[in-house]
Amino acid sequence: MTAFFVGFMALLFHPHFMLAHFAVTMTFAFTVVAVPLLVDRDVTTPMALKTSIRAVAENPVPMTLWALLILVMRTSP
């Protein structure tokens, strides 16, 4: 293995990086459905959050693709 790969893997599994990844993942899971639901429907915040988490849990592949699309569109110039 090259030094770059070893350094990258060490960074990838660094506790701060893992904590940031967890925070971003949870933020996405809480808000991907909840925010539009709160704007369009007459629901409570806890109900919208539960619905958002359930939607992400039941549809992991489409939600992952959606998160990657947001990431690509956000980071492109």
Image (cartoon, rainbow, N blue to C red):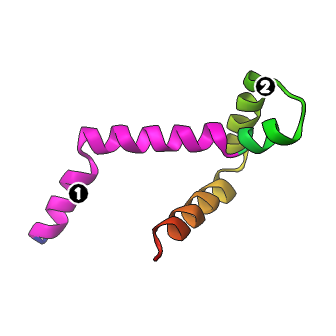
On whether residue 27 falls in the magenta region, the answer is yes
Residue 37 placement: quadrant? top right
Residue at 65% x, 51% y: name it. Answer: 60
Q: Position of residue 9 (x, y in %)?
A: 23, 57
Please state which of residues 25 and 45 is positioned toward the viewer in this rendering.
Answer: 45
Residue 41 placement: quadrant? top right
On whether residue 20 falls in the magenta region, the answer is yes
Q: Which residue is mark 1?
A: 9
Residue at 63% x, 36% y: name it. Answer: 30
Residue at 77% x, 45% y: name it. Answer: 36
Say whether disc 1 or disc 2 marks the residue closer to the N-terminus. Answer: 1
Q: Amino acid at mark 1?
A: Met
Q: Position of residue 31 (x, y in %)?
A: 65, 40
Left or right for 19, reference 3: right
Please state which of residues 40 and 24 is positioned toward the viewer in this rendering.
Answer: 40
- Callout 1 touching callout 2 (CB < 8 Å): no
Left or right for 61, reference 20: right
Q: Which residue is mark 2?
A: 47
